[in-house]
């Protein structure tokens, strides 16, 4: 039996995870964290607490974090220091943050699984895009989200750009240092070396979408993922990660790292 604490229990994904965990024969909800819903029942007999530290006072195995960019890193490090494995669904962490998390996980002999997006189809977006980048070096990313989203780019776009920067060849686009006018309109370079240009749109009616655009002379390829209004697509991948993280030492980034 894997005992799970959900941080962000009153959030969009957190609210969907609570009943899903309760319905699994091999999982048990051991704690739930939400400042705004503290004191309410997550499930019969289990009340939501205001802080992760309070939840960690009780025995558990895995912390699943779906909170906010400004608290997720502290949550992950706190959980690892308390001897818990961690599944990170919150976006907003960069490569330096993950390097620190990976080092602590290795030191403590614990596992962390982090993904910008835990849906199966978003994972396929990443897989197909990385395949295409080996043959078509010119690629840029458009990241779509609601007008209220706090972080930019989204975790999906950021993770994808960081991975693309490692495998794609040299871009033929004019270097940013040679761009006149307002260079910032070319987006931001994300990832190692020259990075991959990411353009973030924040508009009403969008939920989450990520689009990789490739270009060759006289032809183009677009690979795109669109999320719906339900958190259901993220639940299955998150529970898969909660099970697999029990077998891992160190950091695994991306759901695709667990699928094969």
Image (cartoon, grey):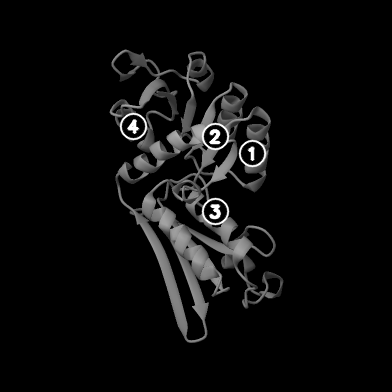
Q: Is residue 46 left or right of residue 123?
A: left
Q: How many marks?
A: 4
Foreground: disc 1 or disc 3: 1
Whole-Å distance between the Cαs marked 3 and 4?
Answer: 25 Å
Q: Are marks 4 and 1 in contact (CB under 8 Å)?
A: no
Indicate the secondary structure of the residue bearing disc 2: helix
> 137 or 252, which is in the foreground?
252
Numbered mark located on residue 72 in the image: 2
- Return the residue at label 4: 15
Quadrant occupied by the N terminus: top left
**Rendered view: 257 above or below 54:** below
Which circle's residue, 2 or 4, is located before the other in the chain? 4
Label 3 Cα neighbours within 10 Å, binned few <14 / some 14-19 / many ≥20: many
Whole-percent x, y for residue 134 in the image: 56, 70
Q: Disc 3 marks which residue?
A: 158
Q: Is residue 188 visible?
A: no
| Circles 3, 4 touching at the beta carbon (< 8 Å) | no
Q: CA distance from mark 1 to mark 2?
A: 14 Å
Q: SS of the residue at dot 1? A: helix
Circle nearer the N terminus (3, 4): 4
Label located before the other in sequence (1 or 2): 2
| 140 lies left or right of 144 | right
**Could you tell me how far apart the alpha carbons at marks 2 and 4 are, in whole angstroms?**
17 Å
């Amino acid at each position: 039996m894997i005992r799970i604490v959900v941080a962000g229990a009153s959030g969009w994904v957190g609210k969907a995870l609570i009943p899903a965990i309760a319905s699994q024969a091999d999982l048990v909800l051991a704690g739930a964290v939400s400042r705004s819903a503290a004191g309410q029942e997550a499930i019969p007999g289990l009340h939501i607490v205001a802080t992760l530290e309070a939840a960690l006072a009780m025995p558990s195995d895995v912390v699943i974090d779906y909170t906010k960019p400004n608290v997720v890193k502290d949550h992950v490090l706190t959980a690892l220091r308390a001897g818990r494995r961690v599944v990170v669904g919150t976006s907003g962490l960069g490569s330096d943050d993950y390097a620190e998390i990976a080092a602590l996980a290795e030191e403590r002999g614990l596992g962390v699984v982090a993904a910008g997006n835990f849906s199966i189809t978003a994972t396929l977006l990443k897989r197909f895009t990385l395949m295409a980048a080996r043959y078509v070096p010119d690629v840029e990313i458009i990241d779509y989200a609601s007008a209220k989203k706090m972080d930019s780019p989204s975790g999906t776009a950021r993770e994808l750009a960081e991975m693309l920067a490692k495998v794609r060849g040299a871009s033929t686009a004019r270097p940013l240092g040679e761009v006149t006018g307002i260079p910032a309109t070319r987006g931001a370079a994300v990832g190692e070396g020259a990075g991959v240009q990411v353009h973030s749109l924040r508009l009403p009616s969008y939920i989450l979408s990520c689009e990789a655009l490739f270009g060759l002379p006289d032809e183009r390829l677009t690979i795109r993922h669109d999320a719906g209004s339900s958190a259901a697509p993220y639940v299955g991948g998150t529970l898969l990660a909660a099970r697999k993280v029990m077998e891992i030492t160190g950091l695994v980034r991306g759901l695709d790292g667990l699928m094969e």
